């Protein structure tokens, strides 16, 4: 019996890489805990090999060879996940989608564009922009992420309040199933033809199949794009303003409300101390944008808001994706992360209060704050950021896990959902049963067994019982 | 071993009905072929019994008893399906949701309302209207359908272009799985916590579980509601007008474009002969509705449309759900049905042309026409209506099947999807593999086996290999 790498190489030639550099570069995603462990010399092991199939057919061959050998396969897109969805074990094969990149077809009349799954998110957006169109999906990771990864993680973009999340932006998918067969969903605007098969793979995090093509339903670049900003006496007043404008049918593309701490830190020039800053961006036909700006202003003022300098929105747009790497902090002994949760309106303030108060009890906590960045008729997300410097460097991982546990506990105790858009990966896998119930977990496991009976695909992620 | 009906009665008492009237009334849905067969004295057999559980717990007991006895269970909501999703065999047990009705909770701030699954659709809408709110889901069947059935069939409402289809309107579900366990999805506005479990049951047509509660994300009743109408020289010009207004970001709630035949038949007073009528309804805040009316008018005029009397919209709103029963026609030897399909913009005209031309070749065809009633950025649906009177009454079923086959063939040959919103049931089950591929069907079968290993739930519907 020859080694699986040799068999892969016999089938796929130079698409199989087993050099130390490739193996090292594909060990993990951007989960800060993996990065910390790396810095401490105890990071994830290098995989056995990295395969970069050039086609769905080659994905199928890769899976077949690994299945025969009983070797786990971890699909790697842009590597920009922040929940530990990618974290190799020594025996794993990494299936990188980097060999499947670029536009397959674009149709201006249908407003469709199909990309191979490894296409970089920003490259895809730039491609359709050349035709005056937009995907309109702006996760902060867009410069790093692959379009397949954006689907597999059920990502949300900064313009989601008007444009929707990734599940609202895709038309059809091509997926290689664990048994190597190709599933292609039908390219129609809508169907009632049984359960929507795309939804199995949205959020599957590499556990149910390998997405090989993604078709987006595009929009033209908007005729108008205008910022608007307000500040409110407190988070409650700001949330009431946002709730009222969503309730009445206004849909700004960007709706970001910051708590007092983040407002001071990020918008000190435009927001009086102690108040909560609301940043809005309206996109669309000129007459709708104008009408929306008027209607939104009236509701925000009624909710106790005061108009602020809209130039802050331009500044935010320009700088929004410039965030420092974790390494700068980790090297100083500071552990940090962001945690996004969601809830209906009634639970938002209790979750915010409880999570911040709980984080502030952590030994060494430096900062705990939050904003909301994705609004819906029935609620919003909350996006927490924490930084802590425990007394001893050796306590950084324990401190990290404690901060996460506290935010998860506060969210669940107050009726929220633990995962708005970063996904489950490993950091949340142990809490999944509290989100969807043990019955929900069993349903996912049953589907996993039905499609991937050997448990070949990304075995450590999503489902509890992993090493989270 | 006692009879299953006795065991059900021992567990559920008077909730088990085995009288002839109850059994007869629950044999089938509104599928015209079942009705025809009934008139011909060869309709579906009466089920063994009708069970009306009063709670999710009683649903679980019903399923457990039937499972132990190896007896199929067909869930019956409002009975208003038109695809043969409900069609009993002599040994079946019908599980009617009529015993689970009414509002569970309503929260004005969160804009949520939870109903038990057997609640009538219109009753649910009237309930939330008392609070100044709307579900906004207006399928033509609303006076008959149950809210559970509206979810299980992935229904679409007449206001879908602004408000979305049922999958866009629900927040969480409670479902009894075939093994009797209760799945409750989390009440959050959005989650990335693995594949969305609600999507398994949207479109499941009673094959994967029994929906027992549905929570909607509501809207307030709109501040303004205004009609608008145009007529176009032909269907192509009308479709271009609709395409352009959707493309540019306008979202009227109602967008209905009729081909020349239906325009003459339904809007003869307002639409010159041979032209295609477009009926629009705008809902929302006054300023957005006003802006939208202006923007839409400009685009429709640019596409070759002429403004028509908006009073037609009020007339349509008032009379939209008054349709004659099939029996009037069947008794005259006329077989008829509606068939809704969908496609991206480029395929709509070829599908319309091919399907109408093909229907017109059917012996005895009286009329073949279509409109579109649900618009999206990347395409619309097409809603065909056909009437035929074959030479011999005995040929009515064969004629019916031929008409269906021709529309399915024309749709698939021209790149469309065969099922926009009525579902699969039995009438489309034999064509499902052409819609989602044999791999797609295998995936559905694998999920079915994983959740319902005994094939207990509605075995004849959705999946091919049934008696379609």
Image (spheres, coloured by chain):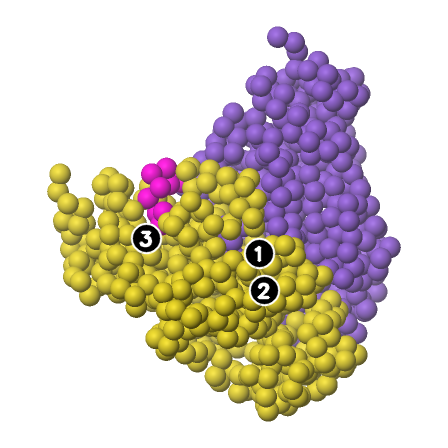
Chain colours: A purple, B yellow
Q: Position of residue A388 (x, y in %)?
A: 67, 37
Separation (CA) of disc 3 from disc 1: 30 Å
Image marks 2 and 1: residues in contact by CB distance under 8 Å: yes
Disc 2 or 3, which lies upstream in sequence? 3
State the residue position of label 2.
B358
The answer to which of B210 and B406 lies nearer the viewer is B406
Asked if badge 2 and badge 3 are on a common chain, one would say yes
Q: In the rendered structure, the residue with mark 2 lies on which chain?
A: B
Magenta highlight: main SS: loop
Is B90 placed left or right of B317 in the picture? Answer: left
Q: Which residues are magenta?
A: B451-459
Task: Please name the residue shown 81% across and 53% down the image.
Answer: A128
Identify the residue position indicated by label 1 in the image: B409
Is residue B354 shown left or right of residue B56? right
Residue A212: give x, y in percent of width and height: 69, 38
The residue tagged 3 is B74
Residue A347 visible here: no
Chain at numbered mark 1: B
The answer to whether B220 is drawn above or below residue B415 in the figure is: below
Q: Position of residue B464 (x, y in %)?
A: 45, 46
Count residues near mark 2 (Cα–Cα under 10 Å), then give few for <14, some for 14-19, many for 20+: some
């Amino acid at each position: 019996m020859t080694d699986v790498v040799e068999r892969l190489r016999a089938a796929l030639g130079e698409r199989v890489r087993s050099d130390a550099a490739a193996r090292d570069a594909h060990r993990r995603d951007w989960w800060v805990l993996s990065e910390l462990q790396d810095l401490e010399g105890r990071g994830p092991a290098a995989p056995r090999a990295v395969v970069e199939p050039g086609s769905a057919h080659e994905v199928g061959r890769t899976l077949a060879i690994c299945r025969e050998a009983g070797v786990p396969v971890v699909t790697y897109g842009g590597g920009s996940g922040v929940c530990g969805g990618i974290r190799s074990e020594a025996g794993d094969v990494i299936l990188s989608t980097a060999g499947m990149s670029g536009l397959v077809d674009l149709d201006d009349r249908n407003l469709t564009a199909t990309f191979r799954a490894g296409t970089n998110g920003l490259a895809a957006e730039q491609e359709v922009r050349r035709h005056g169109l937009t995907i309109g999906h702006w996760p902060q990771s867009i410069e790093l992420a692959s379009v397949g990864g954006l689907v597999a993680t059920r990502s949300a973009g900064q313009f989601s309040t008007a444009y929707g999340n990734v599940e609202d932006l895709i038309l059809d998918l091509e997926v290689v199933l664990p048994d190597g067969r190709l599933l292609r969903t039908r390219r129609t605007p809508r169907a009632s033809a049984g359960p929507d098969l795309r939804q199995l793979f949205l959020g599957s995090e590499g556990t149910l199949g390998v997405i090989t093509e993604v078709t987006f339903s595009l929009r033209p670049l908007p005729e108008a794009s205008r910022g608007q900003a307000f500040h409110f006496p407190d988070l409650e007043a700001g949330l009431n303003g946002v709730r009222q404008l969503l309730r009445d049918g206004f849909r700004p593309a960007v709706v970001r409300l910051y708590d007092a701490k983040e407002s001071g830190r990020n918008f000190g020039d435009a927001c009086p101390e102690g108040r909560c800053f609301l940043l809005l961006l309206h996109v669309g036909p000129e007459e709708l944008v104008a009408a929306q700006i008027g209607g939104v202003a009236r509701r925000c003022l009624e909710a106790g808001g005061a108009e602020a300098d809209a130039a802050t929105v331009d500044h935010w747009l320009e700088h929004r994706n410039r965030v420092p790497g974790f390494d700068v902090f980790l090297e100083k002994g500071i552990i940090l992360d962001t945690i996004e949760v969601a809830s209906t309106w009634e639970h938002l303030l209790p979750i915010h209060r409880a999570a911040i108060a709980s984080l502030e009890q952590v030994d060494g906590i430096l900062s705990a704050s939050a904003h909301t960045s994705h609004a819906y008729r029935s609620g919003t997300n909350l996006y927490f950021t924490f930084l802590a410097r425990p007394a001893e460097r050796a306590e950084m991982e324990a401190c990290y896990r404690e901060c996460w546990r506290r935010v998860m506990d506060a969210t669940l105790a107050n009726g929220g959902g633990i995962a708005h858009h970063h996904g489950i990966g490993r950091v949340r896998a142990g809490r999944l049963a509290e989100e969807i119930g043990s019955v929900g977990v069993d349903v996912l496991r049953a589907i996993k067994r039905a499609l991937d009976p050997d448990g070949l695909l990304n075995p450590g992620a999503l489902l509890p019982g992993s090493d989270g």
